[in-house]
Image (tube, rainbow, N blue to C red):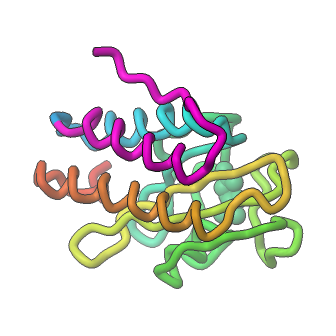
Amino acid sequence: MEPNFYPTTTDKIARYEQFLKEFALFIERETEEISILANTTAALREAFDWFWIGFYIVHGEELILGPFQGNTACFRIRKGRGVCGTAWAKACTQIVPDVEQFPGHIACNSLSRSEIVVPVWQDNKICAVLDVDSDQLNTFDEIDRLYLEQLCQLISQTLYRNKTKCKEIL
Ligand code: SME
């Protein structure tokens, strides 16, 4: 059956619960990392319609742009730079209610107002980060952290099960 991630509820928790259930089934048989990451961004766009959704993938001392949905974005981010590089360096999710208040925020698009960045782990190392931007202030909270961390864990388990190496893969 064709997957359908379009929301049937406005309740945020219910929407995430529905999303995670469908998404787990959707990726269960897939093995290709890039394909899984690409469809993750497409599925999140269908379900939540955020402004920009994408992965930055660890490559040496930099993050490089991976699969995304939205406007063109910076190709490379150094460790510790911007929100993405900070999530990587500090090894924890960053919630930014107002990007203008985040020192060193990298503005790929001036319409982006708030942001959440969640690490993807593999073998006790961060192999990528999921970056979600909103064109509204204060979009992301602890509910987003909880469920997006679960999503990244599911992605990591799927990749690990399939024994691909998160790319440092590329
Ligand atoms: N704002 C991010 C850069 C990536 S773009 O938002 C797509 C950051 O500060 O790391």
**Could you tell me which residue is drawn at 81 percent across and 46 percent down?**
135
| 79 vs 109, nearest the viewer | 109
Q: Which residue appears farthest toward the bottom when viewing the image? A: 90
Q: Nearer the viewer, residue 57 or 24?
A: 24
Q: How many marks?
A: 0
Q: Which residue sits at x=26%, y=78%?
A: 124
Against 170, residue 103 (above or below) is below
Q: Classify the position of ligand 1 by quadrant: top left, top right, bottom left or bottom right.
A: bottom right
Residue occupying the point 58% across, 64% down: 143
Q: Is residue 17 magenta?
A: yes
**Residue 11, how many percent across, how many down?**
62, 46
Q: Is residue 113 magenta?
A: no
* Image quadrant containing the N terminus: top left
Where does the image place residue 44, in percent across and percent down from the top left?
Answer: 52, 39
| Image quarter of residue 131 | bottom right
Horizontal placement of 135 versus 45: left or right? right
Left or right relative to 36: residue 99: right
In this picture, residue 137 sits left or right of residue 36: right
Establish if 47 lies above or below 129.
above
Residue ID at (47%, 33%)? 43
Q: Is residue 152 left or right of residue 42?
A: left
Q: Position of residue 57 (x, y in %)?
A: 43, 56
Residue 133 percent across, percent down from the top left: 69, 51
What span is in magenta? 1-28
**Which quadrant of the figure has residue 37?**
top left
